[in-house]
C-alpha cells in the first residue's frame, strides 16, 4: 500500500492529530500500538494463555515455538486489561520476536473510543440511516444465510485500520441508530435501554479487537475460535496472508455452557441460541459467540483438531469439514526415561506386595468446577466406606483461579472426614513427581487432549478418567499401528459426574495389580507409537511452510489507521448520553466519507467470495502416517480444490 494512498485515505477520514500525553500517562493500549514489531513467519494469537498463564494449551504452544527454531514467531495476546498477568512464565526463546497485547476492557480505550462523536462520520442523517440498515443487513446475512461478505465489507469500511474510511462505532451515538434498534434488532424481549447497552458492549469489544492493524505475519495461527480467531482472520485479511485455526477445545460450546451454568460435557449447536429457554441477555450473548464462529470459519485456510471426534462436534457449530484435519498433541518421549524406569520398579513392588502398598492417586488440574474435584472427593469417600483404606489423593494444580470453588473443596474434605486421605499441594513441578504417582485420576467434565494425560502415560502411569474430549482415543480405544500392531487401553473411563462409576473404576484398578501393570505398559507404548512430539511438530512445520512464505515475509510499507475510541464502563440506564452523542448534521463544508456513496466499497479493498486470496497451485498436506499422530481426514473425500 503506497504512502500517497495512505495519506489521501487519512485525509478523507479526517484523522485527528495524534494525541499527546504527559510523561507516565500514555495508556497501555497506546504504548502497545506505538511499538515497532518486525514481520514474522507465524503470529500465534492467544486468549489469556501463553506466555503469561500456565496450562496445557500454553505448554503446547511453547512446544511449537521451541521445536521449530527456524521459524520466527510473534504472539498476539488478548487479555482483559493492562493489569492482567504479564510475566513470561515460560522463558520464550529467541525466535519469538515480540508479544503484541490487545486489551478488551473499554477503559483501556477511553482515550479514543470514548472521544468519538457522531460528527466524525461526516455523514448526513440520510447516510447514517443507510449505514444503520447496512449494519443490520450484514448481521442478518450472517445469521440467516451465513453470508460473511457483507459484514467483512462493512468492517473494511468502518473498522479495519488499513481500509477504514469512517469510524463505524460512532454510529452507536446517533439518533438514527437508536431509532432503528426497536425495528431492526432481533426481538429478544429486552428493553430499549438493555438493547442499547448490549449493542454497546458488542461495539466496544469489536473495536478493541479490530481497530488497529496487527503486526505482519505470513501465517496467523489462532488457537481457539472466538476473539482470537476474529483477530487472526482480520489480520490475515488486512495483510493478504493466511489464517490457520486450531481448536484445542470448542470455544463456543464451553463459553455457552459456562454462561448458562450447564454441564460442561453437554454439546452445543449453531441453532441453540434460537431455541433454548434462556433470558434475553443470555440469548444475545449466545448469538454473539456462535455467530463469531460462523463468521471466522470461512476465512481459515485450514482448521486443525486434536482428535477425530472433535470435527464432528465442531460441525454442529458450523466448521468447514473440507478444511478440517487432525493434528494431536505430542510428548518428548525420551525426556521421561528416568520416570519410566522408576515406575517400572514401583510396579514390580506392587506386584510383589499389593496388600502392603498405599496407592497414590493423583489429580492434576486447576481447582475449578469443570475439572470435577468435588465429584472425585465423593468417590474417594465411597472407596473408604467400602473398606479401601490404603489410598491417598494428591491434588496438584493452582488453587487461586476460582477461590470459591477451592473453599467448597476444602469444606467437602472436612465434611466427608477425608483430611487424612487428601493433600492439596497447589502448583508443583508435575514431571518431578511422576515417580511417586500410581494412578492419574481425571474426573473432568471437559477436556481436549490433555497434556497431563500424555505426560503420565509417558511414565507408564495408568488412569481412571471421564470419557470426554479426546480421552477415548488416548486411553480407551484399541489403536493399530501402520504395521498392524495393536495397543490396548491404559485405563478405565467413566461418564462425567458419575461418582459411583469413578469409584468403581479406581477400585477395579487398585484391586487388580496385574491389570494395573498391563495398563502401565500400554500407556507407555501408546505414546511411543502415536503421540511423539517430533512427529507432531513436523506436521506443524509442514503446515506453516505450505500456508505461508516462511522467511520471506516483509514489513508493510506503512501502517494505516485512526486513533479513535468509545463509551465508559459505568452504564447509564437511561440510554446514550454524552458518551454516545445524539445525531448531529455535519458542519457546513465538511468533507464526505468519499466522493462515492459513503455506504459503497472502499478503494483498494478486495472483492469476491473469499476473504483471503487464493494462491497459485494446489496445497499438499504433510505425509500421513497411519496413526492418530498424523494429519488425518475424518472420512472425507479427496480434496478437489486448493486449501488456500
Image (cartoon, helix red, strand yellow):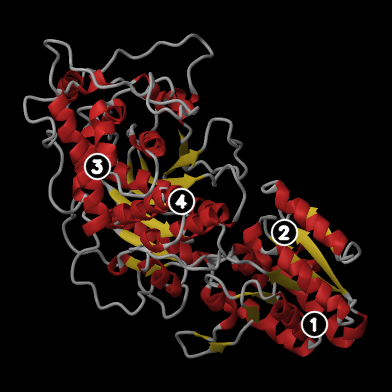
Q: What element carries label 4?
A: helix
Q: How far apart are marks 1 and 2 (CA)?
A: 22 Å
Q: How far apart are marks 3 and 1 (CA)?
A: 64 Å
Mark 4 is surrounded, within 10 Å at the Cα level, by few (under 14), some (14 to 19) or many (20 or more) other residues, namely some
Q: Do the residues labelled 3 and 2 touch (CB within 8 Å)?
A: no
Q: Which mark is residue 564?
A: none
Q: Distance between the residues labelled 1 and 4?
A: 45 Å
Split into 4 quadrants, where in the image is the C terminus? bottom left
Q: Look at discs 3 and 1 and give the one toward the viewer.
A: 3
Q: Nearer the viewer, residue 312 or 302?
A: 312
Q: Do the residues labelled 4 and 3 touch (CB within 8 Å)?
A: no
Q: Which of 76 and 81 is in front in this view?
A: 81
Direction left: furthest residue: 596
Q: Which of marks 4 and 3 is nearer the N terminus?
A: 3
> Horizontal and vertical percent for residue 613?
19, 50
> Horizontal and vertical percent for residue 546?
30, 58
Q: Which of marks 4 and 2 is nearer the N terminus?
A: 4
> Horizontal and vertical percent for residue 58?
55, 52
| Residue 151 appears anywhere in the view | no
Q: Look at discs 1 and 2 and give the one toward the viewer.
A: 1
Q: Is residue 300 above or below residue 218?
A: below
- From the image, tell me which residue sits under label 2: 430
Mark 1 is surrounded, within 10 Å at the Cα level, by few (under 14), some (14 to 19) or many (20 or more) other residues, namely many
> Horizontal and vertical percent for residue 243?
32, 51
Q: Which of 439 and 615 is in front in this view?
A: 439
Q: What element carries label 2?
A: loop
- From the image, tell me which residue sits under label 4: 282
Q: Tell me which corner region of the image, top left, top right, bottom left or bottom right, holds residue 2.
A: top left
Q: Which of marks 1 and 4 is nearer the N terminus?
A: 4
- From the image, tell me which residue sits under label 1: 510
- From the image, tell me which residue sits under label 3: 183
Q: What element carries label 1?
A: helix
Amino acid at each position: 500500500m503506497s504512502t500517497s494512498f495512505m495519506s489521501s485515505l487519512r485525509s478523507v477520514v479526517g484523522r485527528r492529530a495524534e494525541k499527546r500525553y504527559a510523561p507516565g500517562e500514555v495508556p497501555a493500549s497506546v504504548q502497545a500500538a506505538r511499538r515497532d514489531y518486525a514481520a514474522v513467519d507465524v503470529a500465534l494469537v492467544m486468549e489469556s494463555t501463553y506466555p503469561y498463564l500456565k496450562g496445557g494449551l500454553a505448554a503446547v504452544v511453547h512446544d511449537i515455538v521451541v521445536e521449530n527454531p527456524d521459524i520466527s514467531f510473534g504472539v498476539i495476546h488478548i487479555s482483559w486489561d493492562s493489569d492482567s498477568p504479564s510475566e513470561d512464565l515460560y522463558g520464550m526463546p529467541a525466535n519469538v520476536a515480540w508479544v503484541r497485547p490487545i486489551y478488551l476492557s473499554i477503559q483501556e480505550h477511553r482515550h479514543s473510543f470514548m472521544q468519538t462523536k457522531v460528527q466524525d462520520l461526516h455523514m448526513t442523517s440520510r447516510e447514517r440511516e443507510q449505514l444503520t440498515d447496512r449494519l443490520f443487513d450484514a448481521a442478518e446475512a450472517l445469521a440467516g444465510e451465513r453470508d460473511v461478505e457483507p459484514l467483512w465489507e462493512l468492517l473494511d469500511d468502518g473498522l479495519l485500520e488499513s481500509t477504514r474510511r469512517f469510524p463505524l462505532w460512532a454510529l452507536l451515538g446517533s439518533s438514527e441508530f437508536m431509532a432503528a434498534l426497536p425495528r431492526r434488532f432481533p426481538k429478544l424481549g429486552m428493553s430499549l435501554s438493555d438493547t442499547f447497552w448490549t449493542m454497546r458492549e458488542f461495539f466496544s469489544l469489536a473495536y478493541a479487537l479490530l481497530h488497529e492493524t496487527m503486526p505482519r505475519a505470513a501465517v496467523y495461527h489462532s488457537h481457539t475460535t472466538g476473539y482470537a480467531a476474529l483477530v487472526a482472520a482480520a489480520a490475515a485479511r488486512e495483510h493478504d496472508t493466511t489464517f490457520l485455526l486450531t481448536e484445542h477445545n470448542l470455544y463456543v460450546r464451553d463459553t455457552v455452557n459456562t454462561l448458562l451454568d450447564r454441564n460442561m460435557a453437554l454439546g452445543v449447536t449453531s441453532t441453540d441460541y434460537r431455541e433454548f429457554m434462556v433470558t434475553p441477555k443470555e440469548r444475545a450473548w449466545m448469538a454473539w459467540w456462535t455467530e463469531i464462529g460462523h463468521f471466522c470459519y470461512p476465512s481459515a485456510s485450514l482448521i486443525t483438531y486434536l482428535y477425530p471426534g472433535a470435527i464432528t462436534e465442531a460441525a454442529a457449530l458450523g466448521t468447514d469439514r473440507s478444511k478440517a484435519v487432525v493434528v494431536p498433541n505430542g510428548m518428548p518421549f525420551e525426556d521421561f526415561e528416568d520416570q519410566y524406569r522408576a515406575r517400572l520398579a514401583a510396579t514390580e513392588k506392587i506386584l510383589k506386595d499389593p496388600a502392603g502398598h498405599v496407592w497414590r492417586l493423583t489429580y492434576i488440574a486447576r481447582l475449578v468446577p469443570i475439572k470435577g474435584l468435588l465429584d472425585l472427593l465423593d468417590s474417594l469417600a465411597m472407596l473408604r466406606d467400602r473398606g479401601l483404606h490404603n489410598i491417598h489423593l494428591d491434588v496438584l494444580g493452582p488453587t487461586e483461579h476460582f477461590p470459591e470453588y477451592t473453599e467448597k473443596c476444602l469444606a467437602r474434605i472436612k465434611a466427608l472426614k477425608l483430611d487424612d486421605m487428601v493433600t492439596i499441594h497447589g502448583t508443583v513441578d508435575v514431571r518431578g513427581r511422576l515417580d511417586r504417582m500410581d494412578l492419574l485420576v481425571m474426573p473432568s467434565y471437559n477436556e481436549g487432549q490433555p497434556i497431563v494425560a500424555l505426560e503420565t502415560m509417558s511414565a507408564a502411569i495408568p488412569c481412571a478418567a471421564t470419557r470426554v474430549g479426546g480421552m477415548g482415543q488416548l486411553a480407551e480405544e484399541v489403536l493399530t499401528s501402520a504395521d498392524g500392531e495393536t495397543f490396548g487401553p491404559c485405563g478405565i473411563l467413566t461418564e462425567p459426574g458419575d461418582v459411583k462409576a469413578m469409584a468403581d473404576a479406581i477400585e477395579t484398578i487398585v484391586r487388580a495389580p496385574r491389570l494395573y501393570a498391563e495398563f502401565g505398559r500400554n500407556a507407555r507404548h501408546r505414546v511411543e507409537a502415536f503421540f511423539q512430539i517430533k512427529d507432531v511438530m513436523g506436521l506443524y512445520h509442514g503446515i506453516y511452510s505450505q500456508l505461508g512464505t516462511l522467511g520471506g515475509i516483509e514489513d508493510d510499507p506503512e501502517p494505516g489507521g485512526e486513533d479513535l475510541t468509545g463509551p465508559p464502563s459505568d452504564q447509564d440506564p437511561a440510554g446514550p448520553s454524552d458518551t454516545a452523542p445524539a445525531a448531529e448534521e455535519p458542519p457546513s463544508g465538511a468533507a464526505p466519507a468519499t466522493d462515492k456513496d459513503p455506504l459503497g466499497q472502499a478503494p483498494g479493498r478486495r472483492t469476491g467470495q473469499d476473504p483471503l486470496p487464493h494462491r497459485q497451485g494446489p496445497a499438499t498436506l504433510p505425509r500421513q502416517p497411519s496413526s492418530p499422530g498424523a494429519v488425518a481426514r475424518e472420512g472425507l473425500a479427496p480434496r478437489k480444490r486448493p486449501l488456500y
